[in-house]
Image (cartoon, rainbow, N blue to C red):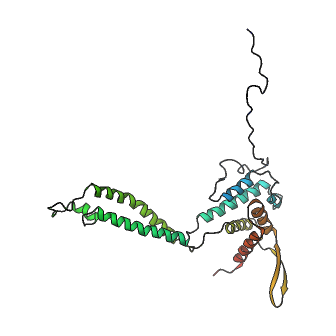
């Protein structure tokens, strides 16, 4: 029996396309870049992009990598801390109190819902409340049968019963939002929450927030500020301008406002 001719390598079969894999530092923290360890889907798509960049880009390729605070801290540890900053800021925005517009629209829906339930009750009763009908049963003085409930009334009764639980859920949600300590207002800005979260982490490791201000003092007016610089501002610019999409002027303004707010005395 003759042997079939040997198939040369590559003949008769298509090579599978190679999948590009993210380049990770071999010393990276195992929580960074591993599927399922860090949620890469957040309510804001820009957060997801930044988290993906921080978790998958090779060590040393991002501007923030050169800002490792001390020899004991590795680039993967810094990256993981910055990822946690983004997750903390996203959670803060998610848990923030509803805006005035949201509460106004929800209350309007609740008012209309109340009218719907009251109107359906009039369809499904014989002039008495639903509780009285259940307790007393059919009326004894309906000799002509004018107050008997027909099939349509039964259908509307079921619809009213199904519509009551979501009505109660909406009412509870409104009460919960109104009882939150913070005042309803505008939705928290993304950059502001990111700067606040970054400042919290920075202070937790012993960093100072105060920037150095380059300015000329004047006797007849406020000082003319030419610029600000400092370790925290440098980190904020490297993260929010080169990895994220904000402008340097926006970041500098947000950092300044955050620092002044924390310096202001609390009443």
Image quadrant holding the C terminus, namely bottom right
Residue 138: quadrant of the picture: bottom left
28 sits left or right of 90 in the view: right
Judge whether residue 119 can be spotted in this image. Answer: yes
Name, please, the residue furthest toward the bottom: 220
Residue 126: quadrant of the picture: bottom left
Residue pictured at 46% horizontal, 70% vertical? 108
The total of numbered circles placed on residues is 0
Name the residue nearer the viewer: 12 or 73.
12
Residue pictured at 51% horizontal, 70% vertical? 103
231 sits left or right of 122 in the view: right
Name the residue nearer the viewer: 239 or 205.
239
The image shows residue 168 at horizontal and vertical percentages of 42, 64
Judge whether residue 207 can be spotted in this image. Answer: no
Name, please, the residue furthest toward the top: 1
Residue pictured at 77% horizontal, 63% vertical? 241
The image shows residue 261 at horizontal and vertical percentages of 69, 76
Image quadrant holding the N terminus, namely top right
4 sits left or right of 186 in the view: right
The correct choice, above or below, for 23 with respect to 7 in the image is: below
The image shows residue 25 at horizontal and vertical percentages of 79, 49
Residue 181: quadrant of the picture: bottom right
């Amino acid at each position: 029996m003759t042997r079939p001719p040997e198939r040369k390598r590559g003949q008769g079969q298509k090579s599978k396309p190679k999948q590009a894999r993210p380049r990770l530092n071999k010393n990276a923290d195992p929580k960074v870049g591993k599927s399922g360890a860090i949620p890469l889907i957040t309510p804001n798509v820009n957060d997801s992009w930044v988290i993906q960049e921080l978790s998958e880009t090779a060590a040393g390729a991002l501007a923030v990598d050169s800002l490792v605070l001390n020899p004991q801290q590795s680039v993967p540890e810094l990256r993981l801390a910055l990822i946690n900053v983004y997750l903390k800021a996203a959670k803060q925005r998610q848990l923030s109190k509803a805006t005035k517009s949201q509460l106004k629209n929800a209350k309007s829906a609740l008012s209309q819902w109340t009218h719907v339930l009251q109107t359906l009750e009039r369809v499904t009763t014989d002039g008495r409340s639903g509780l009285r009908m259940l307790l007393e049963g059919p009326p004894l003085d309906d000799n002509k049968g004018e107050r008997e409930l027909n099939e349509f009334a039964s259908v509307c009764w079921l619809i009213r019963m199904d519509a009551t639980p979501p009505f109660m859920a909406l009412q509870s949600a409104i009460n919960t939002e109104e009882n939150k300590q913070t005042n309803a207002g505008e939705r928290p800005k993304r950059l502001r929450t990111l700067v606040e979260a970054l400042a919290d982490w920075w202070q937790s490791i012993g960093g100072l927030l105060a920037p150095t201000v380059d300015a000329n003092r004047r006797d007849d007016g406020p000082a003319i500020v030419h610029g600000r610089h400092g370790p925290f501002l440098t980190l904020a610019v490297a993260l929010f301008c080169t990895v994220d999409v904000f402008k340097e002027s926006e970041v500098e303004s947000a950092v300044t406002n955050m620092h002044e707010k924390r310096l202001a005395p609390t009443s």
